[in-house]
Amino acid sequence: MQVSVESTSALERRLTIGVPAERIETEVNKRLQQTASRAKIPGFRPGKVPMSVIRQRYEEAARQEALGDVIQATFYEAVVAEKLNPAGAPSVEPKVFEKGKDLEYIATFEVFPEFELAGFEGIEVERLQAEVGDADVDNMLEILRKQSTRFETVADRVAENGDQVNIDFVGKIDGEAFAGGSAKGTQLVLGSGRMIPGFEEALVGARAGEERVITPTFPEDYQNLDLAGKTAEFSVTVNSVAEPKLPELDDEFFARFGVTEGGLEGFRAEVRKNMGRELRQAIKTKVKTQVMDGLIDSNPVEVPKALLDNEVNRLRTQAVQQFGGNIKPDQLPAELFSEQARRRVLLGLIVAEVVQKNEIKPDEARVRELIEEMASAYQEPEQVVSWYYKNDEQLNEVRSVVLEEQVVDTVLKQAKVTDKSVSYEEAVKAAQAPQAA
């Protein structure tokens, strides 16, 4: 077998591979012999069909199958011999594909980038320090109460912000009704910001049974461009007004969250524990984000298009699975996912290099600790832990998370880390964990 390599770009390689005709014919004959042993042809006993008849009927199919297998095998042999690391499947272009002649083809593909990992000394990380205080627990109890708010109808007063009104409305622009501008029996909490600016405000002070005509204006950046910036006229009928009633902090309320013992103090302890878990995860996520950003900034690596395309397709599939709809993944525009896909692939390449260079392996004790922490949020944590250890796919996902945490720890040992004391609320502000593909 003859192989020549050409670098057509930083990552693209072009292999020209020549395979002796004898190897092709050997593979073809092997398949014809296998076919002859089981072929059933009228007029001949099984296994006694002349090879000339077998060739006449099956040689073309056997040759195509042999060519495919030989190309696959010789491509693998070539990249191993040339010490190449393909990042995706090759594009194969035949040069000589004729019977009786040596096979010659060109395989074009991308390789994984080779790069020297930059040091971690220049990465700066701000690590937040916070605690769950009594006031934070009090605030969380109020949030939980508000989430369980029920509304009671009132007949003797006007609607206020925070009240829930039941309304019918018909919206028109220039005297013409528009799609989505009318509804009956809609429940609306005034001040929730659910409707366009000016709509909810115009209903403050209304009574049950009252009809009002209001004229709010759609925002200039409204998602429906046909309505953006236009003033509408809504005829609104207020069917009822209901005021919010917050539940008491009693055993019935505690039971909704799975706390059946300990009364208020037991419930506060459970809430504090959950808040502590959320706080630790938020701080960890923000540190991880800074570390990953630092790794990307200090390691400008070219991303193979094959890996990028694969990741875009994976994100497309995830989006369809998450949001549903009667669409196929490839109907979603690739550009919606290209930036996220590039970041994930880039992180994957860099993190893999950190793992290899530092010989990092998942710490099984940390894997167990993480699983137990996740399981503690459930009523029967032992069953959750057992479930993880019986599901290899889920267990490997946890190992991947732990491996990335160990990468973060490795970077932090050399990075410039400063600690900053903040409130619980500031520490748990939304932070999205970076993911490596």
Image: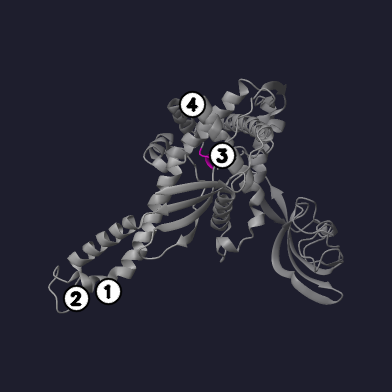
Magenta part of the protein: which range? 251-258
User: How much space separates mark 2 and mark 1, taking CA atoms?
Assistant: 10 Å
What residue is disc 3 on? 348
Mark 2 vs mark 1: in front: 1
Q: Quadrant of residue 271?
A: top right
User: Which image quarter is the C terminus in?
Assistant: top right
The label number, if any, that marks residue 57 in the structure image: 1
- Alpha-carbon neighbours of circle 1 within 10 Å: few (<14), some, or many (≥20)? few
Q: Amino acid at mark 4?
A: Glu
Kindly identify the residue that appears in the image at 17 percent across and 79 percent down.
42
Q: Amino acid at mark 3?
A: Gly
Q: Position of residue 371 (x, y in %)?
A: 46, 33
Q: Nearer the viewer, residue 129 or 10?
A: 10
- Alpha-carbon neighbours of circle 2 within 10 Å: few (<14), some, or many (≥20)? some
Name the N-terminal-most of marks 3 and 4. Answer: 3
Q: Are marks 3 and 4 in contact (CB under 8 Å)?
A: no
Secondary element at image label 3: helix
Is residue 369 part of the magenta span, yes or no? no
Q: Are marks 2 and 3 in contact (CB under 8 Å)?
A: no
Say if residue 266 shows up in the picture.
no
Mark 4 vs mark 1: in front: 1
What residue is disc 4 on? 359
Q: Position of residue 335 (x, y in %)?
A: 67, 55
